[in-house]
Image (spheres, rainbow, N blue to C red):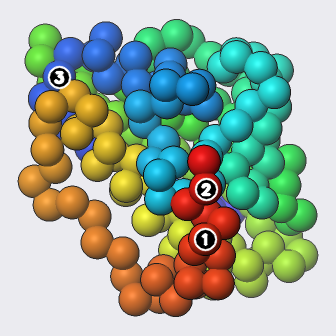
Amino acid sequence: MVYNTHQREIAAPASEVGSLIDSLASEDDRLWPRSQWPAMRLDGPLGVGAAGGHGPVRYFVTAYEPGKRVEFQFTGPSGFKGQHSFTATGLTGNSTLLQHELSISPHGTAMLTWPLFFRPMHDALIEESLDRAEKELGVPPGAPHRRSLWTKILRAPFAARMTRK
């Protein structure tokens, strides 16, 4: 079982951070770093049952609490059984924890592709998403994410396709 979590405390009210989650996969997506990564696309508005993904990663929405949380169930790539979610949790009136959680049971080829390819790419994408969240809310990240050399190498063959909207 793989459990992977990324979180950032953001100096903004939960309602503002939650609105970033609500914008996912829309024309005005303010959370997903789509200028540098494959855009998140769904076959309809963000809501339970909407299906789509980003790049080779496929999923559908299994839970959605507007302004608070969205959860997706993986349908691809092969060997990925599990889910991922974004959650905004108010800490104080002007402080919110934005968290992304991924839980999968990789099997078959995913036992190799997750640690060697998908995990480093996932980690970079999510950290850049958290950076974007802060920038969108006028709170520049103290230490913006820097891609590892391995992530840069992995992205190189796909760079032109990955940055298309």
Disc 2 crowd, CA 10 A, few/some/many (<14, 14-19, 20+): few
Residue 129 image point, x, y percent? 40, 47
Dot in front, 3 or 1: 1
Q: Secondary structure at mark 3?
A: loop
Which numbered circle lies on residue 55?
none
| Residue at 28% across, 72% down | 146
| Residue at 52% across, 74% down | 120
Image quadrant where residue 16 sits: top left
Q: CA distance from mark 3 to mark 1?
A: 34 Å
Depth check: give the residue in front, 164 or 77.
164
- Against 47, is 58 above or below? below
Q: CA distance from mark 1 to mark 2?
A: 7 Å
Residue 64 image point, x, y percent? 62, 17
Q: Secondary structure at mark 2?
A: loop
According to the picture, the residue beneath numbered tag 2 turns out to be: 164
Q: Secondary structure at mark 1?
A: helix
Image quadrant where residue 43 sits: top right
Image quadrant where one finds the N terminus: bottom right
* Residue type at numbered disc 2: Arg
* Residue type at numbered disc 3: Ala
Asked whether the residues under the numbered discs 3 and 1 touch, taking CB atoms below 8 Å apart as contact, a structural biologist would say no
* Sequence-first disc among 2 and 3: 3
Asked whether the residues under the numbered discs 1 and 2 touch, taking CB atoms below 8 Å apart as contact, a structural biologist would say yes
According to the picture, the residue beneath numbered tag 1 turns out to be: 160
Q: Is residue 164 visible?
A: yes
According to the picture, the residue beneath numbered tag 3 turns out to be: 12
